[in-house]
Image: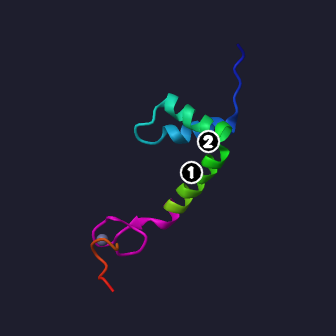
């Protein structure tokens, strides 16, 4: 059987595999699903990931996840 590479797919597999607890087989399954089975779910994942990375920071006071400099859970006073 001849092996060939699809670079974009390999890059996606490598990106999934770089996540904690994700091995090669799971990374291939997730990449295949996101690209070949349900492209809409793949696009939703891509958009949610980009949005979360751009919006979520560490609270400067308690280091919880926050969308603002001070988190709304512990550090920001109630209005
Ligand atoms: Zn905080």
Does the stretch in magenta take in 65?
yes
Mark 2 CB lies closer than 8 A to ligand 1 = no
- Residue 26 in the image, given as x and y percentages of width and height: 50, 32
Residue at the (60%, 37%) spot, across then down: 33
Vertical comparison of 79 with 64: above or below: below
Q: Is residue 23 left or right of residue 14?
A: left
Q: Main secondary structure of the magenta part?
A: loop
Q: Which residue, as the protein is rendered here, is positioned at the far bottom?
A: 79
Q: Which residue, as the protein is rendered here, is positioned at the far top?
A: 1
The part of the chain drawn in magenta is 53-70
Q: Is residue 76 left or right of residue 32?
A: left
Say which element carries label 2: helix
Ligand 1 found in image quarter: bottom left
The location of residue 58, given as percent across then percent down, is: 37, 66
User: Which residue, given by chain and number where applicable, does mark 1 sit on?
Assistant: 45
**Where is 44 relative to 2, above or below?**
below
Check the image and tell me how it is coloured: rainbow
Front-lying residue, 43 or 13: 43
Question: Mark 2 = which residue?
Answer: 34
Quadrant position of the N terminus in the picture:
top right
């Amino acid at each position: 059987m001849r092996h060939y590479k699809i670079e974009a797919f390999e890059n996606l597999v490598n990106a999934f595999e770089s996540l904690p607890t994700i091995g090669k087989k799971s990374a291939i399954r997730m990449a295949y699903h996101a690209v070949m089975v349900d492209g809409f779910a793949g696009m939703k994942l891509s958009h949610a990931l980009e949005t979360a990375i751009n919006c979520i920071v560490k609270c400067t006071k308690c280091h919880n996840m926050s969308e603002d400099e001070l988190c709304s859970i512990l550090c920001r006073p109630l209005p």
